[in-house]
């Protein structure tokens, strides 16, 4: 693939990730967005419609994952990296989404708010991309 097309693709998909973040209030149902902007350490969790919240988290994770995989494809053009990334994203989604559901349904006090904050953060932000890009780059170009 020609270098300008590769750079353009990366910029387009990265811009889409930024747009998801910019319009998160209108695109997704998430009462925890405002909750974590307040002094959440002393407050109980807000009232939430659980199923729209879970659906929203899943949808946002899928959108971020698809865009992240596209960026990985434009950067590396390697099917093995994409296959491994799909497996890793799937495993981490199952693990983190299960933890998210457990925390939301069992959270009674304020002690689990930080855990909920970080589990949710990994589900709704493309943080895995920030971890995978340098890891794959190091693995691919160091092994030459």
Image (cartoon, rainbow, N blue to C red):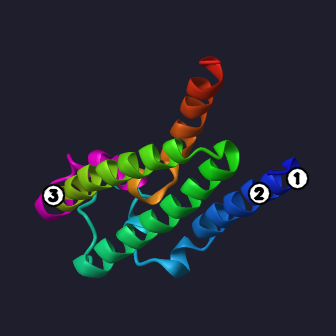
* Position of 27 relative to 57 (above/below): below
* Position of 85 relative to 40 (above/below): above
* Position of 134 relative to 122 (above/below): above
Assign the C terminus to one quadrant of the image: top right
Q: Look at mark 1 in the image and give the residue it sits on.
A: 4
Mark sitting on residue 102: 3
For the residues carrying marks 2 and 3, which lies nearer the camera in this image? 2
For the residues carrying marks 1 and 2, which lies nearer the camera in this image? 1
Q: Residue 37, position in %: x, y? A: 46, 59
- Principal secondary structure, stretch drawn in magenta: helix
Q: Label 2 crowding class (10 Å Cα cut-off): few <14, some 14-19, many 20+? A: few
Q: Residue 107, position in %: x, y? A: 15, 58
Q: Are marks 3 and 1 in contact (CB under 8 Å)?
A: no
Q: Residue 123, position in %: x, y? A: 39, 56
- Residue located 33% across and 76% down the image: 55
Which segment is the magenta one?
A: 104-121
Q: Are marks 2 and 3 in contact (CB under 8 Å)?
A: no
Badge 3 element: helix
37 left or right, relative to 13: left
Q: Look at mark 2 in the image and give the residue it sits on.
A: 11
């Amino acid at each position: 693939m020609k270098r300008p097309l590769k750079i353009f693709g990366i910029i387009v998909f990265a811009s889409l990730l930024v747009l998801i973040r910019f319009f998160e209030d209108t695109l997704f149902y998430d009462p925890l967005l405002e909750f974590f902007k307040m002094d959440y350490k002393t407050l109980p969790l807000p009232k939430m419609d659980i199923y729209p919240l879970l659906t929203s988290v899943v949808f946002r994770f899928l959108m971020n994952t698809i865009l992240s995989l596209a960026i990985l494809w434009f950067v590396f053009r390697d099917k093995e990296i994409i296959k491994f990334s799909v497996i890793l994203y799937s495993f981490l989604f199952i693990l983190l989404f299960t933890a998210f559901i457990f925390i939301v349904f069992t959270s009674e006090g304020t002690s689990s708010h930080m855990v909920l904050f970080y589990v949710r953060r990994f589900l709704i932000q493309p943080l895995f991309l920030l971890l995978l890009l340098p890891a794959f780059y190091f693995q691919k170009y160091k092994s030459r």
